């Protein structure tokens, strides 16, 4: 009986569970797939003109269609080659992850659950490539994947999708009386044609097939910009004009140098360029101090932060009387003439020789080196000799420019051992040995001395008698 009740209870539970499962699998009224669809909208700023190099802020928004909105992943795709940066701090609600992907994609994720009506905002920036051609570009391939309870959904991104990129047809202009702009050589009596200022854009590009030249009316200072040079003000705004003004020197030239001609303030201050532009300044040979050659002329710029003149790699054209340097920013520039360093002697020591390398105590050991002067002037050089790091001798030698001289030394040591001798950074060892003891020999017999054979014979006979007596006595004892 009890077993039957348990069986019926189990069947009831299984039927109820199956019914619930079927109910969950059926789209009830008001809960269709369409009701769970999320509208994702992309917003691109409405700007008058977008040029290569500009940066745009893209916003994507959507809202949760129901409760238990979770595991949300948003992916948006900028045009190919555009640089993407994700602004996670501006995303609402706070993202679980936010990162650029695949070079020109942006991806965000949130982990819920979130309530129905929760709004989401994803923000990223894109940079327009500098070499882009004029055209209309499309944001495409964006999608949103999310879960409502255990059901997975995916939808695309709507809203703004296209943007037009236009190169600015711009040339430099001027509104100052002491500079003009043109695209060729200086005029000869005819007023030069001033270029129109560029349209307001984030970055300005030099246009046309030729370089742009801005110069003072007297042609003493010139700025030359290559085609498609990117020009910005200090606050990253478009550069619409360039000024070149002769000004008093902000600081005297450093010691050993002198300012040649005028100091020119190229403006506006803080303007930057990519690639570098050429600054050319003219000079007169009469302004160069005596003893300073034209090869010692350089363009220097004044650095306000340090209050110092900084030299630039410069190209001197002695025939044209100009000095040119390449710069990426504006400040005050001038030609400085640095006094040529006087010629100096330059010494090297080579060819150390020691002879002999092994000697006795007190014996002379000879050492020599070759001193060469490769400098441009005659000079004297002190050449010390060291033994085991201690100076024991020194020679002073005067050598003419381009010549060599041998320097000789004589040393000896009072103690045996191996010693390290060094001259001018060169080193070799030598050994001093102690004298050996002579072999002790018996003195030879005096000359003319005769041999006393009688004494020798008597001694030998006595010894023989003693030996015979000893033998007889031993034999006698044995007989007893």
Image: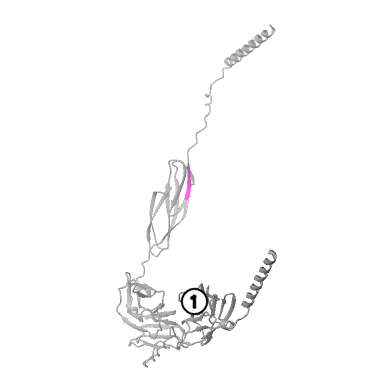
Residue depicted at x 61% and y 12% = 466
Q: Is residue 116 left or right of residue 299?
A: right
| Along the line of sight, the residue nearer the viewer: 317 or 53 | 53
Colour pattern of the rendering: one colour
Question: Does any portion of residue 141 appear in the rendered image?
Answer: no
| Along the line of sight, the residue nearer the viewer: 17 or 144 | 17
Question: Does any portion of residue 4 appear in the rendered image?
Answer: yes
How packed mark 1 is, by other alpha carbons closer than 10 Å (few <14, some 14-19, many 20 or more), is some
Regarding mark 1 in the picture, which secondary structure is present there? strand
On screen, residue 142 above or below 342:
below
Q: Residue furthest bottom?
A: 190
Find residue 112 and report its horizontal and vertical position in percent.
52, 73
Q: Is residue 471 left or right of residue 441?
A: right
Q: Does the magenta portion include 422?
A: no
Residue depicted at x 46% and y 48% = 420
| Along the line of sight, the residue nearer the viewer: 127 or 289 | 127
Numbered range of the magenta stretch: 428-432
Residue depicted at x 66% and y 71% = 12
Find residue 61 and report its horizontal and vertical position in percent.
50, 81
Identify the image quadrant of residue 363.
top left
Which secondary structure is most common in the magenta stretch? strand
Find residue 140 and report its horizontal and vertical position in percent.
55, 83
| Along the line of sight, the residue nearer the viewer: 264 or 242 | 242
Q: Quadrant of the C terminus?
A: top right
On screen, residue 330 above or below 371:
below
Residue that numbered label 1 is attached to: 85
């Amino acid at each position: 009986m009890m077993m039957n009740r348990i069986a019926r209870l189990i069947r009831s539970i299984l039927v109820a569970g199956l019914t619930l499962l079927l109910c969950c699998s059926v789209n009830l009224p008001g809960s269709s797939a369409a009701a769970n669809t999320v509208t994702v909208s992309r917003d691109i700023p409405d700007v008058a003109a977008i040029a290569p190099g500009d940066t745009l802020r893209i916003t994507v928004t959507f809202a949760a269609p129901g409760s238990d909105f979770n595991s949300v992943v948003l992916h948006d795709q900028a045009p190919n080659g555009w640089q993407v940066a994700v602004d996670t701090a501006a995303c609402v609600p706070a993202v679980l992850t936010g990162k650029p992907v695949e070079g020109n994609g942006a991806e965000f994720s949130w982990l819920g659950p979130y309530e129905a009506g929760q709004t989401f905002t994803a923000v990223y920036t894109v940079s327009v490539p500098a070499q882009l051609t004029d055209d209309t570009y499309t944001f495409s391939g964006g999608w949103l994947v999310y879960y409502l309870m255990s059901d997975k959904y995916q939808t695309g991104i709507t809203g703004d999708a296209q943007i037009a990129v236009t190169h600015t047809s711009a040339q430099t202009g001027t509104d100052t009386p002491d500079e003009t702009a043109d695209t060729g050589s200086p005029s000869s009596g005819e007023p030069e044609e001033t270029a129109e200022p560029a349209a307001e854009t984030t970055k300005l590009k030099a246009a046309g097939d030729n370089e742009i030249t801005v110069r003072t009316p007297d042609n003493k200072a010139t700025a030359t910009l290559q085609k498609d040079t990117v020009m910005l003000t200090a606050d990253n705004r478009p550069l619409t004009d360039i000024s070149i003004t002769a000004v008093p020197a902000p600081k005297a030239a450093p010691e050993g140098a002198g300012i040649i001609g005028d100091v020119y303030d190229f403006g506006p201050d803080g303007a930057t360029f990519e690639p570098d532009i050429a600054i050319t300044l003219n000079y007169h040979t009469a302004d160069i101090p005596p003893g300073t050659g034209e090869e010692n002329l350089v363009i220097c710029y004044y650095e306000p932060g340090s209050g110092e003149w900084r030299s630039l790699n410069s190209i001197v054209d002695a025939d044209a009387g100009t000095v040119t340097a390449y710069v990426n920013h504006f400040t005050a520039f001038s030609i400085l003439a640095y006094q040529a360093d006087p010629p100096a002697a330059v010494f090297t020591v080579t060819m150390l020789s020691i002879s002999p390398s092994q000697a006795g105590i007190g014996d002379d050991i000879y050492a020599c080196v070759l001193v060469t002067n490769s400098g441009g002037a005659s000079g004297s050089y002190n050449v010390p000799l060291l033994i085991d790091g201690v100076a024991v001798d020194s020679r002073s030698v005067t050598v003419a420019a381009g010549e060599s001289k041998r320097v000789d030394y004589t040393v000896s040591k009072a103690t045996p051992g191996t010693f390290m001798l060094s001259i001018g950074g060169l080193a070799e060892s030598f050994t001093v040995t102690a004298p050996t003891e002579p072999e002790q020999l018996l003195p030879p017999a005096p000359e003319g001395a005769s041999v006393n054979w009688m004494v020798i014979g008597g001694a030998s006979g006595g010894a023989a008698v003693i030996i015979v007596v000893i033998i007889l006595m031993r034999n006698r004892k044995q007989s007893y």
